[in-house]
Image (cartoon, rainbow, N blue to C red):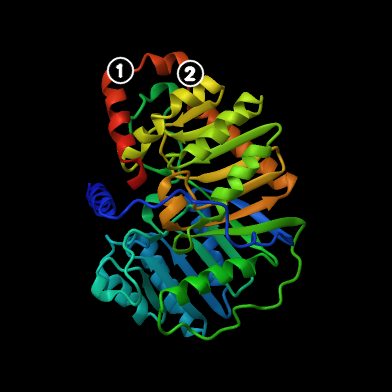
Amino acid sequence: MRRTLIVLAWVALAACAAPAQAPVAAQRPESPLVGGNDAQLLIDGPRTHAAMFAAMDSARDSINLETYILEAGDIGERLLRTVAAKTRQGVKVNVLYDGVGSIGTPADYFDRLKQAGAAVCEFNPVNPAKARRGWEVNNRNHRKILVVDGRVAFTGGINLSSVYSSGSRAHRAPQEVKPGEPSDRGWRDTHVEVEGPAVAQLQKLFLDGWAHENCPGIRSAAYYPRLEARGPKAIRVVSSDPEQGRSEMYTTLLRRIGTARERVWLTVGYFVPDEEILRALVDAARRRVDVRLVLPGFSDFWAPVYAGRSHYGELLDAGVHIYEWHKSIMHAKTAVIDGTWASVGSTNLDWRSFVHNWEADVIVEDPAFAQALERRFREDAAGSIEVSASQWRSRGGLERAKEWLARQWQYFL
């Protein structure tokens, strides 16, 4: 309930800001595609948090953590213990958290984190009196980045929150779940662990974010060690920078969907597409590309789900396959195209990610990685409820009214 109230208040606050334009083609060159990497998919919170804490436990020089949500529950207490242990060993720890995403976390938790030895900085505080630079309350840091010793990095959709502790294991079969019913309050999400030269790009994103906020007291460390090849995967780290009016992931996805020949499979936590993304998906389906979407059947806030559903008719008529996940909250942001190109990150297909958020995603050009993500997509689709065109046309008036209402506010969601 508290998080719902926070979201409602945030939507009201965001509505006070003047709408921006949809992102245009990137003004800067694309980030480089770097070879020699290894990348491992991490599915759901338990496995991801275990891998992240294992990496932090082995840290010898530095831990850089950037997250949208940092909660003070079990996972937060575990982080406190880890920070205290590692700083006693001389490891430098820097933590950057978002002021809105972590708005429900008590201030004394961050004080304790500092007392444990970490340098801690709030990104774009909601309170303008605490702002260290220009106050842009509608622009948020939605990234989830962890870099340990400059040699191993994690990114994706998973925050440091106890809501991920239960994972997304289904307790009932899809046919036993009524549409929209919160049958399991766990979260289904995806992260990735990276080793190799591409780690330096994620490290740069963290350090750029710290500098952007004029955060004080970053610990001196060897943040850019020499990185040897760790595997065969080519990786590109893409980011969003709302102050420069660019979302590299947006333009990259548009281009890849537009050139897809066989299949476009997307899993999206918040699906509120603009006209360009919608048109790209429709055009791909009409040229016989296999376009499939796994989307949330319910979420932590109802409006984005219904705003996304307001576009179902056009997508279904074009031949797009839509699957709604009802077992838990779908929060993953992944794409796999033509079995060779894949992405994992924090970018949703919504206006907030396109225009107002700092985001981070990794693009992996490797058939083995893409095939692993395709296998996961098939599992998620099989565990979802497919939406048929005939079923969609027969939905009730109340559902249509909710879709209409949510669509009027889609820019602010």
Which element carries disc 2, helix, strand or loop?
loop
Is residue 314 in view from this perspective? Answer: yes
- Residue topped by disc 1: 396
Q: Give the CA separation, mark 1 to mark 2.
A: 15 Å
Q: Earlier in the sequence, mark 1 or mark 2?
A: 2
Is residue 165 in view from this perspective? Answer: no
- Residue topped by disc 2: 388
Going by the numbered disc 1, the residue's amino acid type is Gly
Q: Residue at x 44, y 53 (%)?
A: 355
The percent coordinates of residue 22 (x first, y second) are 46, 48
Going by the numbered disc 2, the residue's amino acid type is Ser
Are the residues at dot 1 and dot 2 in contact (C-beta closer than 8 Å)?
Answer: no
> Could you classify mark 2 by the number of other residues whose Cα lies within 10 Å: few (under 14), some (14-19), or many (20 or more)?
some
Q: Is residue 256 above or below residue 173?
A: below
For the C terminus, the quadrant is top left
The percent coordinates of residue 214 (x first, y second) are 41, 79
